[in-house]
Each structure stands twice: as C-alpha cells, then as structure tokens.
Amino acid sequence: MPRKLNRHSPSRNIAQKILIACEGSKTEPIYFNSIRNELRSPTLDIIVLPHQNKTDPRSIIERLIEERQQRKDNQQWSKEDKAWAVFDGDEHIEKSLANWQSAINRAKSQKINLAITNPCFELWYLIHFQDHFAQITRDRLVNLLEMHIPDYDKSMCLYPKPLKSLTEQAIQRAEKIAKQIERNELSEHSNPCCSGLSKLISSLLNLKNS
C-alpha cells in the first residue's frame, strides 16, 4: 500500500498587540500609524485608538483599561500584549496636579505603560536632530524644530522621512535626558523629558525582527 504522508497545518505566528491611546488628535496618531504602515510586520499589531474628546491623563488611562478589558473578554489579549498611554506633561501638571498624580498611580497599578513628553510631543521630534536639556516652552520648542523642519505643522507625516534614519539617535538622546533628570534628582516627568517614549519606540522597531 502507498505510504500515507502526514500533513501538518502551516504554523502561524500570533501577532503581539501594542495598544496605544494618545492625547493628541494629529501629531501622535499620524506618527504611530506611519510606523505601523512602514513596518507591515506579521508579528506585531500596532493599534492606535481613535481620538476622543476627553484627553486628560486619567481619562486616557481609563480608556486604555476599558479597551484592554474588552479584548480580554473576547480572548483577543495575551500576556505578551502591551497597553501604552501617550500624553504631555506641563499643561496637565499645572492644570490639575491631583488628576495627574491619580493618572500616574492608576497606570502603575493597572500595568499601563506611560510615554510622557514634557512640554509636548514635538520634543521627541526635536531630539532626532539635536540634544536638548534645558527647560523649554512649547512655542520655543516649535521654533527650534522649524530650524530642521521648515514650516512644521502638526498634521505633517514625518515618518519614515526624515525621522526614520535618525530614530536611534533620538532614543540615545532621550536616554541622556533621563540620566540628567536622575542625576539632578528631579521628577521623572520634568521639563524636558521623553519619559518612556524611547522604550515604546524601541519595542516597536525591535519587534519587527523578533
């Protein structure tokens, strides 16, 4: 009798999910969606949640917890999946320190990862091009950024060009800022900072080849 061949179903990699909720309606979602589109990774699913009106830190954290729970209930969430909240520091700290601290504590207790920029997300763009360690306002930050990206606008798509080739330098500069904050015994989210953001970007780019 002819020998029967054992047929094995093709193996399929289960995509790790990175769930991201952003404060901004343009800059951050455009950036993260551009990374997702550039990667086109079969093993990484980057999910940028649609923007909502409530953008205070506590509301962003609660939304992530709710979205994550829905995926758990639908068996669409694993231990390897991660949830990230992306928001600014300065205005929220000044407006309501209680809301800010409540959001930070809630995130830590619920294992929500934080990517915080102070004063704003444009600092992350700036350190692709240069070091920056001094406290800075939003307006001054945009002025510096325009020296590298003339006529900068929040709706611009800057990934992959011009930022992709400079991303590793930005990660290194963000880590240098974090070390300076630690040396000076300042708050983790002092101005300036890109706290957690370099870790998020590193994980997105490294996972492509995992």
Image (cartoon, grey):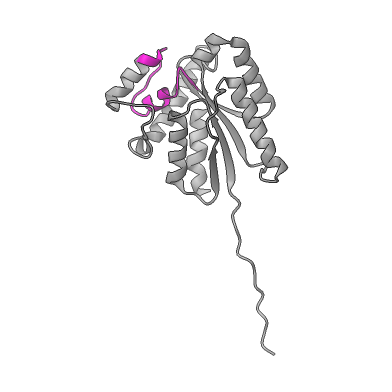
98 and 178: which one is in front? 98
Give the dominant element type of the magenta stretch: helix, strand or loop.
Answer: loop
Residue sitting at x 67%, y 43%? 78
Q: Residue at x 36, y 18 (%)?
A: 141
Q: Which residues are magenta?
A: 117-139
**Residue 100 quadrant:** top right
Q: Residue at x 44, y 45 (%)?
A: 37
Residue 54, horizontal then vertical, whole percent = 57, 23
Name the spot of residue 189 as percent of width and height, x first: 53, 17
As drawn, which residue projects farthest toward the bottom?
1
Q: Who's the residue at 41% across and 35% down the image?
A: 168
In screen coordinates, is 111 left or right of 48?
Answer: right
Residue 102 on image: x %, y %: 65, 17
Q: Is residue 138 magenta?
A: yes
Q: Nearer the viewer, residue 40 or 174?
A: 40
Q: Quadrant of residue 188?
A: top right
Q: Is residue 54 magenta?
A: no
Q: Is residue 11 visible?
A: yes
Residue 122 sits above or below residue 98 on the image: below
Compare residues 3 and 136 and report the one nearer the observer.
Answer: 136
Classify residue 14 as left or right of residue 137: right
Q: Is residue 48 above or below residue 57?
A: below
Q: Quadrant of the N terminus?
A: bottom right
Q: Is residue 155 left or right of residue 61?
A: left
Q: Is residue 154 above or below residue 17?
A: above
Identity of the residue furthest to the right in this view: 73
Give the percent coordinates (x, y) of residue 50.
Answer: 53, 34
